[in-house]
Image (spheres, rainbow, N blue to C red):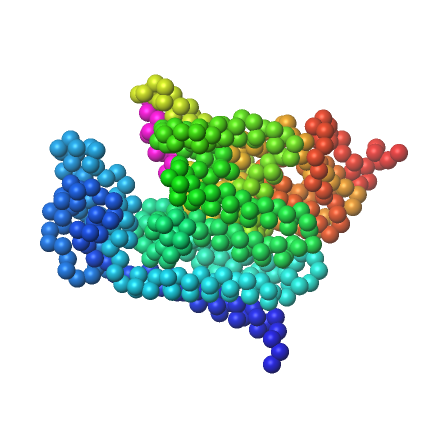
Amino acid sequence: MTLTDKHIRYTGKFLFLAGFFLFNLTLFTGRYRITNDTLALSGLNEEMITVLINEIGPLPADDLSKPQIIKITGTAIRKANKLFRQENKSELVVYNVPETVFNISKSGMTGFPERKKELFSLLVFTLTIAGALMIFAGNTEYNKPGIRNNGIFVRPATGRGFAGYALAAYLLLFYTCLYFFPAWITEPVALTDPISMRITGQPAGRWFMYGFLYTVFILVLGIRFIIRYRNNRYQVWRTVSVIFFQTIFAFSIPQILAVLNQPYMDLKNIWPLDYSFFFSYRIGEYINAGTIGYFMIGWGIMLIIIAVPVLTYFFGKRWYCSWVCGCGGLAETAGDPFRHLSDKSLKAWKFERISIYSILVFASVMTAATIASLFLPGSRIFGMPANILQGIYGFLVGAVLAGVAGTVLYPVMGNRVWCRFFCPLAAYLGIVQRFRSRFRITTNGGQCISCGNCSAYCEMGIDVRAYAQKGQNIVRASCVGCGICSAVCPRGVLKLENGPVKERVKINPVLTGNLNDIV
């Protein structure tokens, strides 16, 4: 029997679903044991371990289930914290209880897949990655010329159907556990232990696991994107770029720095997206690191005050949002099938303007308080100390909006929800792009047939067709320069260009049928 594209595609789906099933199966197979050794391996000091053992009572002789170890250790830590506060031993208080419970549960793993971790890890990631690549290879739509979106509005996964909402619900559970209840995903983290041990020599933490999965998703789904848009050089090269920056700058270099006992730094992350850059513990780590630490401080400040305005002046915000940024990289690769779901309504645009610039103001105020606290300890802004503002911002923006909502809402509201409505760096870049940048998307209104492809697939919710029909250049603060509007246009109406800042916004555009413009 000849191996057809259909056979390859269905085999790929089977392999991918098998790997995905095994990955999630680990969530229900873990067993744990609490001992003096496991408590010590979790990073607790001797006094805390002694108090915890007293609070727990006789250590369970049998292995515990996940709910049992989370309940027992969480309750004991909270009781110990109460005791330490009563005795004015604030230095012994555990402030991040969920993280400590996760560390205890991970160090105390005894059951499957702990015993066969390397084999199981290899099996899970090989099946899912190989399966995904086979699905792409067997997709007949990718083998035909042109960019095809047949049926994308009515498919259950991409048309706000049951599959799309099920995916959103799964992502919501995963991200909620990742950020707030990490002990519930101990086993998936443990699956990346063999990888972490080979790179850093240390067992994986939840953020190593997430960084690894994030990078794999951008790499594998970036291959899909390149295959799909292979006839458009702009799309191919910007996808290669985001894969490179995520793999090297966001994942590999920080792991190398950790191996060398140097401060962690994603060299492509820029304030205010990197909102903790000026936090006292980060500045302290940089200063203690000596020369390389001072370089990191200088590098971060240079990006803020020089790289952002200069590069945005010449290339628009696309140089970062579509070519460098990890958030944008995931949105463009994993989120590509959902770009048409972005809200194009006037109400969404009004909300976007209020929300994104409010976050930028919030980030600026929080950072101002942070910098002031470095020189004037105890200083306050609006009656609140810097650490309170940091905590509020970190929870609402860093975790809830950037972490959870930004990806969970892909199948519901499109792939650029975070970038469009909440990212403070996108707001900063957008201000420069709107008022002082050479970048614009030019239009040839006479060629426009009003098919609406450009507006339908604009991930930032811009009504591109309205500009094209009027022959107006598109100069918007929200535009990330992804170029998909130009790629899907059947008439070549749209073109991404850099030119003189003066007169880039046409006041009296050429309109089809406008007699005043006919010479």
492 left or right of 5? right
Residue 455 in sight in this render: no
Residue at position x 53%, y 30% in the image: 303
Residue 496 in sight in this render: yes
Vertical order, 125 against 467 (above or below): below
358 left or right of 476? left
Q: Which residues are magenta?
A: 382-396
Quadrant (top left/top right/bottom left/bottom right) for the N terminus: bottom right
Q: Nearer the viewer, residue 180 or 195?
A: 195
Is 361 in the magenta?
Answer: no
Vertical order, 423 against 172 (above or below): above
Residue at position x 78%, y 46% in the image: 447
Image coordinates for residue 181, horizontal then vertical, percent:
31, 49
Image coordinates for residue 330, horizontal then vertical, percent:
52, 48
Residue at position x 72%, y 26% in the image: 502
Seen as rendered, the residue at the extreme right is 519
Q: Quadrant of residue 23?
A: bottom left
Quadrant (top left/top right/bottom left/bottom right) for the C terminus: top right
Q: Nearer the viewer, residue 106 or 294?
A: 294
94 left or right of 510? left
Main SS, magenta residues:
helix
Residue at position x 44%, y 32% in the image: 292
